[in-house]
Amino acid sequence: MDDLPPSLVLEILNRLADSADLARCRVASKSLNVLSREVRSVNLFCSLDRYLKSRAVETRLLVMPFKVILKSLMNDFVALDSVSIGVEKSLGRISYEHDDVEDWSDDLFLTDVGFAREWLPAIGRGLTSLSIVDFWVQSCWRQSKILALITLCCGNLQELELKNAWLSVDGLNRLNSLKCLTLEFIRLDDEDLSEVNYNFPHLEILNLIGVGGLNEPKIHLSHLKTCRWTVSNAPVSLSICAPSLSKLELKCVKPKSLIIQTPMLSDFHFCLQDASGLQVNEFPCLRKLQLHFPCLYSLITTFSSARTIKELTLNTMQRAESVESVKLCLDTLFEIFPNLSFLKLGPGVLSEAETCYQAEGLDGRIGMRDLKKLHASLETYKIELKLPFIIPILEKCTDSLDMELLIYRNADSHLAGGIMSKRAVNHPRPKWRWELWKEGLKEPWAKGHLSCQV
């Protein structure tokens, strides 16, 4: 390493994902120790193993406090533009899986403004990215005013991420440089988000995941382009006014009022537990839509005629067996979305459509001439029972249709392969593929078994 050009060594050090490795490099070589002071990023996270050792009677005196290590690192580097500190995910799960955990320490209370004052003012002006993942067990009952300190010291900050903390908005300063803000599992003392709107006016990306303390929140940001918002059942009304927003992922329970004023929206992921009484505004630029609801029929009919949408993904939530609902029909689906080129039907949706088909069939109104890809999940392992419904769909499609079926993992793979191969011969024009899926997987469209592609 001593023979390498200093610029190349510095580039290598900057690419280290864990600053603990950087500390080891500093001990190994004098030249590395000197060059390390010029690295531009710090990434250091407390592991579960370290935390457990710091609590155990026989080892806790041997473990250096995490805040001492962090402070030493920050004071050693003179050119930092990115800082990412916190607890690892394995440690974070303690907060939610073990409610009886008691920890009166503050060594992992990383949004502690007193601690932050010991290192942030010295490096804040050069920072463009800052991420702090707090330890909820120690932070949930301690209010932090770190936001005010950040807006005071970090005038050039572009990306800010804060997780697992209780944040005050007292004393905020306007931070015009900030483009991306992520708040995850945060108790925020800003009921209507007015302080966020005013003090971060140039946000282009906003992620609010599990943010509590809100009451009638309103997002009013003229430069916002991407927003991900997961809302609890507490707010009775939600409002999003963002004239430049192009992508929105919104997950909520049952707000009494939902206002979405986003004329440039083109990609919309929408998850709602109860769509009764919902009215959907026109989205003239909408091209991609993903819906996740207990009763899809009651939702898609609120869209009136959505002729601009080209890609549609539908998923259903589990609901009580006693709840009666109108089943989703493919005829209705293609009347509302007549220009689809891609359609993905999640587990349960195809079963609803099949129930409707058995009662009404598929008539000539179904508009599948523009459909290029059809992806569907089968909940049953009795694949042969679904084919009388699938084949009529294929007969209404064009020659270029790409058909992909996700088959329940308990299905007989040999039987599935045989049936698919046989049907590929009888209906050679669509491209046939099948894969196995497992219930509960975050992304069921995993790589699986390819039986036939014609």
Image: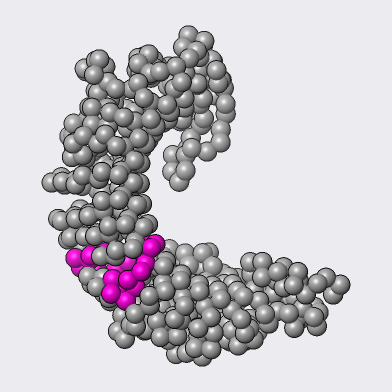
Is 205 left, or right, of 80 in this rendering? Answer: left
Residue 194 image position (x, y, % from top left): 24, 73
- Residue at the spot 73% in from the left edge and 79% down from the top edge: 35
Looking at the rendered image, the quarter that the C terminus falls into is top right
Vertical position of residue 439 compared to residue 42: above or below: above
Task: Assign the N terminus to one quadrant of the image.
Answer: bottom right
- Choose between 32 and 175: the one closer to the eye: 175
* Image quadrant where residue 252 sits: bottom left
Residue 258, how many percent across, how many down?
Answer: 19, 55
Relative height, residue 214 to residue 169 (above, below): above
- The x and y percentages for residue 278 are 16, 47
**Residue 76 occupies which quadrant of the picture?**
bottom right
Whether the magenta-drawn stretch holds residue 201 is answered as yes
Decide whether residue 446 is among the magenta residues. no
Q: Residue at x 21, y 60 (%)?
A: 239
Residues in magenta, as a range: 196-219
- 391 or 51: nearer the viewer: 391
Residue depicted at 30% across the width and 50% down the height: 264
Would residue 138 be visible to someone looking at this image? Answer: yes
Identity of the residue drawn at 23% across and 27% down: 335
Q: Is residue 185 visible?
A: no
